[in-house]
Image (cartoon, helix red, strand yellow):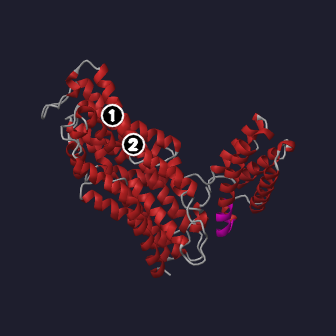
Amino acid sequence: MFGLDTGLTILLLACIIAALAFEFINGFHDTANAVATVIYTNSLKPNVAVVWSGFWNFIGVNVGGIAVAMGIVNLLPLEILVDPNIYHTVALILSLVLTAIIWNLGTWYFGIPCSSSHTLLGSIFGVGIAYMLLPGSQAVALNWKKVEDVGLSLLASPIFGFGVALLLMYILRLVVKNKLIFNEPPKDKKPPVWMRAILILTCTSVSFSHGSNDGQKGVGLIMIILIGIVPAHFALDHTKSPEKLLSNIQNIEIVMNQADTTKFTAENKKEINKLTIRIDTLKSHLINVTTFDKLETKQHFKVRKDILEIAKKTETFITKTAVTAYNHDKVKVIKADIKSMKDYTEYSPWWVILMISMALGLGTMVGWRRIVITIGEKIGKSHLTYAQGASAELVAASTIGVSTWLGLPVSTTHVLSSGIAGTMVAGKGKDNLQMKTVKNIAIAWLVTLPVTILMSGLLFLLLRLILR
């Protein structure tokens, strides 16, 4: 497979199967976020709810784009995947995937709503930090700017979920005349048709949003595996033309040289000289290349890195540093070519997306009961009402949707759990919360990153010794 020997082929398949297992576990770990409200308000029977949720998770992965997936891929600088000993790359990948699986299974077993996003990102951070400790390794083994963006997203989302859900409940109490929606649902009795429709719609929205965000994490994980182990096939999108890429580079160079250099600072001139050198290097790799199959394995990494560096530095240069040196039309032309360049690295084969969507969708249909009970019965002291269920899921769906649009991973679990907590507080104050459960969720939120960082880092160093 892909020109690998039997041993590496087996390891590649093992890594892919492990990534699919992570996504399957993610499915049944996070199912509760979508179905708890429709189950506890008698809007849908449990078996119907989980199948419905699984279907919309599947759809969400397939139509949600790949912005979040590429954010996951770009957390690790390319250098960390370029190891002369490919078994070291396998050790890195297995370490982060196995850590994510172990922690997700552990928290699910104890019925603790825990973020698969935190788990995966902590695992990635762990191998990155461990790599920095190796003799002779580079000082930077994580994309710290991307780490900062992701960290802020994960930190802010549960706070946002709690606050907005609480506010939404207060508003509903002021404007809604029908107080039925604030009462505990009658046992074994379906809600009114209009309320049932709203609850099913919000369940659908959370399921779809979860697929479009969490599913992309699995896509990103498999792309890390493929780029690291078989870069000659996946570091670049082979369905695209190298000649078109060369044309994009030449267009950028031409327009960049049309700048009003009288408006350049000394620093601007140094930056454009560095960009010119990088552009010339990339052009040298692409001259007379009609298909990426003609590039050597190492050249695939070099071309990928050049594309990423040129795109990032050029965009920064024209939009922030020296924007006054270019008119609007020239900036527009350069940005169009940069976008076209990024398509060569920011992609995923259709079969990767299909595998992840199936794993997530099927996972959603099993193992849901433990977390559903926690969300439906153990966060608040009172039974979940129609208004609380709809408000929490509306906030969760919108928060996840915006995060996906911004290309940021977000924790469905934490947004939904904090949203339910917010609705409970809006009803009867903080005394309406079961503090033991809230503390368990908060502790899991706080310890997930340090535990997974330590676990994946140590596992990476151990497997690196074993796989030589």
Residue at left 53%, top 73%? Answer: 133
- Residue at the disc numbered 2: 159
User: Residue most toward the top?
Assistant: 177
In the image, what residue type sits under mark 2?
Ile
Towards the viewer: 258 or 53: 258
Label 2 Cα crowd, 10 Å radius (few <14 / some 14-19 / many 20+): some
The answer to whether one can see residue 183 in this image is yes
Query: Which residue corresponds to mark 1?
Result: 166
Q: How many numbered badges does the structure rendering display?
A: 2
| Residue 299 located within the stretch drawn in magenta | yes
Mark 1 falls on what kind of element? helix
Horizontal relation, residue 21 to residue 331: left or right:
left
Magenta residues, as a range?
295-303
Helix or strand or loop: what does disc 2 sit on?
Answer: helix
- In the rendered image, residue 372 lying in the magenta stretch gets the answer no
**Amino acid under disc 1:** Leu
Is residue 139 depicted above or below 448 in this figure?
below
User: Where is 245 relative to 161, above or below?
Assistant: below
Residue 348 visible? The answer is: no
The one of 320 and 258 positioned closer to us in this rendering: 320
Camera-side residue of 438 and 127: 438
Of callouts 2 and 1, which one flags the residue occurring earlier in the amino acid sequence?
A: 2
23 lies left or right of 194: right
Residue found at the very far left of the displayed protein: 187
Based on the displayed image, in which of its 4 quarters is residue 424 positioned?
top left
Q: Residues within 10 Å of mark 1 (few under 14, many from 20)?
A: many
Marks 2 and 1, how far apart in space?
11 Å
Which percent across, then down, holds residue 308? 65, 55
Left or right: residue 112 compared with residue 229: left
Q: Residue 172: where, in percent of width, then height?
A: 31, 25
